[in-house]
Image (cartoon, rainbow, N blue to C red):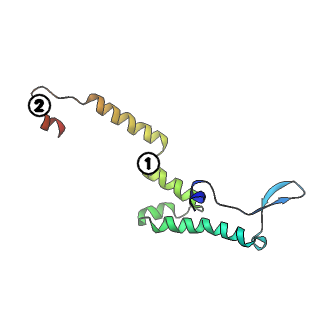
Amino acid sequence: MLDVITDRPFIPSTINVMTNEMIPKPRPEWNEVETKKVQTNFKAINTLHCALTPTELNKVSRCTTAKKVWEKLRIIHEGTSQVKESKIALITHNYEMFKMKSGEDITSMLD
């Protein structure tokens, strides 16, 4: 199930003999193994949905794959790479500016 979340869902495909390209297989042509692999995506989505708060669920309810749900949750909780870089810069700046003022004791400095 983790593969579906981190990679992408399985889509049964076949080769188009005219264009020699992979195309999605019609559902009636799926075999039992392909059907089970497709169901794994829906199980993963359901598992993720069951673990979410109503607010989080509202934000990811339109996602059609478990991977999309996971990515949306990652951005909601961690932020984009720009947000992460900004947070790191701010924390680094606060750390570099942290020092004891004249006449201040350790207890009040840490408050």
Above or below: residue 31 compared with residue 14: below
User: Quadrant of the image for the N terminus?
Assistant: bottom right
Residue 85 percent location from the top left of the image: 44, 37
Above or below: residue 86 compared with residue 1: above
Residue 61 percent location from the top left of the image: 52, 64
User: Quadrant of the image for the C terminus?
Assistant: top left
Q: Pick whichever, 77 or 8, lies toward us.
A: 8
Task: Quickly name the residue at label 2.
Answer: 104
> Horizontally, is 98 left or right of 73 in the view?
left
Q: Secondary structure at mark 2?
A: loop
Task: Quickly name the residue at label 1.
Answer: 78
| Amino acid type, label 1 | Glu
Above or below: residue 44 compared with residue 104: below
| Amino acid type, label 2 | Glu
What's the residue at 45%, 53% (across, down)?
76
Which residue of the protein is positioned furthest toward the front in this rendering? 33
Q: Secondary structure at mark 1?
A: helix
Q: Earlier in the sequence, mark 1 or mark 2?
A: 1
What's the residue at 51%, 67% (across, down)?
47
What's the residue at 79%, 71% (across, down)?
29
Quadrant location of residue 96?
top left
> Horizontally, is 58 left or right of 92 in the view?
right
Residue 66 percent location from the top left of the image: 57, 61
- Mark 2, Cα crowd under 10 Å, few <14 / some 14-19 / many 20+, is few
